[in-house]
Image (cartoon, rainbow, N blue to C red):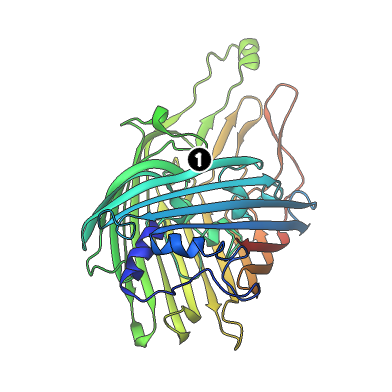
Amino acid sequence: MLGMFLRTQAGATEPASADPYSGGFFTRSTLTGDWGGLRNEWAEKGVTFDATLTQIEQGVVSGGKNGSWEYGGRGDVNGLLDTQKLGLWPGGFLTVELEGNWSDSVNGKTGALMPVNTNQINPLLTGDNVALPALNVAQFLSPYAGVTVGKYATITSTFGDMNEFAHGKGDTQFFNVALNFNPTLAITVPYSTLGAGVIGLPTKDPNEAIVSFLVLSADGKASTDGFDNLSGNRLSFNGEGRVRTDFFGVTGHQLVGAIYSNKQFTSIDQRIQFEPLQRRLGLGTQTIAKKDGSWAAYYNFDQFLYETDKAAGHGVGVFARFGASDGNPNLMQYFYSAGVGGKGLIPGRPLDQFGIGYYYLSIKNPTLQVPIVGTKSFLRDEWGFEAFYNVAVTPWMLLTPDIQVIGPAQKHPIGRNRFGLPVIGQESIGTATVLGVRLQLIL
């Protein structure tokens, strides 16, 4: 959501369409149009409301854990208030987001750590939820610097590992989490959380360069305000910088960041003991091993190779990500992804998009020392491939077929026996092929 007001500020000096929501039914930017002129009038005064409705049908057609098909969806409403346009004071922005998801996904049926449907894990992992993941304010004190405070939906914020070809909540580009966001950050920063920080714009234009430093709650949730969990011992500290490049006369970006959390986490290496069995065997009281703090560092770039319309972001390019973590408590020790993306390459179809991507996740395998059963490990490194084509049926209706092939981290299914002890099954979880189709309506 922070990205919304920064994009608005960047466009404040550029001429905008006088009636951005107007037009014929099949040519206007949104399904519901300009609301009799009211929507355009509000936008001129700095108040905008934008909404999307995204539905996905997806199935594991081979491999994985379960081959059934699942249907789910998510609604998302974003609001922005620009104090300067409203006639109040310059440099102030209020942003708010309301979202909800419903029904099911195949995320738990592939054996992968990375959800193959990002859209269905927001605002919460299970369906049938409505929450307010973002409500924050920002005030620019000069053209070069500002402060911000509030609640953030970090995966789509400006300080959230942005990338031209591979970023978001799985509703416009890639479906898979690993191709939308760097997963090595997931343990240290929640999807929705309270925070405060400073923003720097070295050239006055956030499209050219932006740096940020934020202090975030390490225990935030989209479904709560987060104040009950605020603690100086459970914080995450995030610094990030992104700069635009123009190598060979075409657009690109370079991004680097790091994050540290002082929260106490559960160690990935455990000696598991269960109370009923402990009494029988005289093994004493169960103790869960802890680990203080966790860190991660990350980098990404996007680079156009060919641009047909620089102002509109049309062309084809490449992207890549890298992430590294401590390996304990964060079992995702190293992460790599790379791919190709493009928009507006076909004449007469300026809104079509496509993407092809690959990721590799290097796992620091957790070990479980279980009485009688012995020491067990149950994960392996994970990899995945995804390709999509986003067809703009109209400017406000986007239809996207998608295919993913996943080498899942989970080696065998895990259950429990009659004593409550973990049991690792004998059958192997093989490479999963996932087909899906997405329909997004821009309301």
* Residue under the point 40% across and 64% down: 44
Which image quarter is the C terminus in?
Answer: bottom right
Q: Where is residue 412 drawn, in percent x and y?
A: 70, 45
Q: Where is residue 84 drawn, in percent x and y?
A: 29, 58
Quarter location, residue 300: bottom left
Is residue 114 something that shows in the picture? no
214 sits left or right of 374 in the view = left
Q: Dot 1, how many residues are within 10 Å of its Cα: few (below 14), some (14-19), or many (20+)?
A: many
* Residue under the point 72% across and 55% down: 430
* Residue under the point 61% across and 82% down: 349
How many numbered markers are drawn? 1
436 sits left or right of 182 in the view = right
* Residue under the point 33% across and 31% down: 233
Q: Where is residue 78 drawn, in percent x and y?
A: 49, 54
Q: Which residue is mark 1?
A: 222
Quarter location, residue 423: top right
Regarding mark 1 in the picture, which secondary structure is present there? loop
The amino acid on which the numbered mark 1 sits, given as a three-letter code, is Ala
Which image quarter is the N terminus in?
Answer: bottom left
Q: Nearer the viewer, residue 439 or 331?
A: 439
Is residue 39 something that shows in the picture? yes
Which residue is most to the front? 36
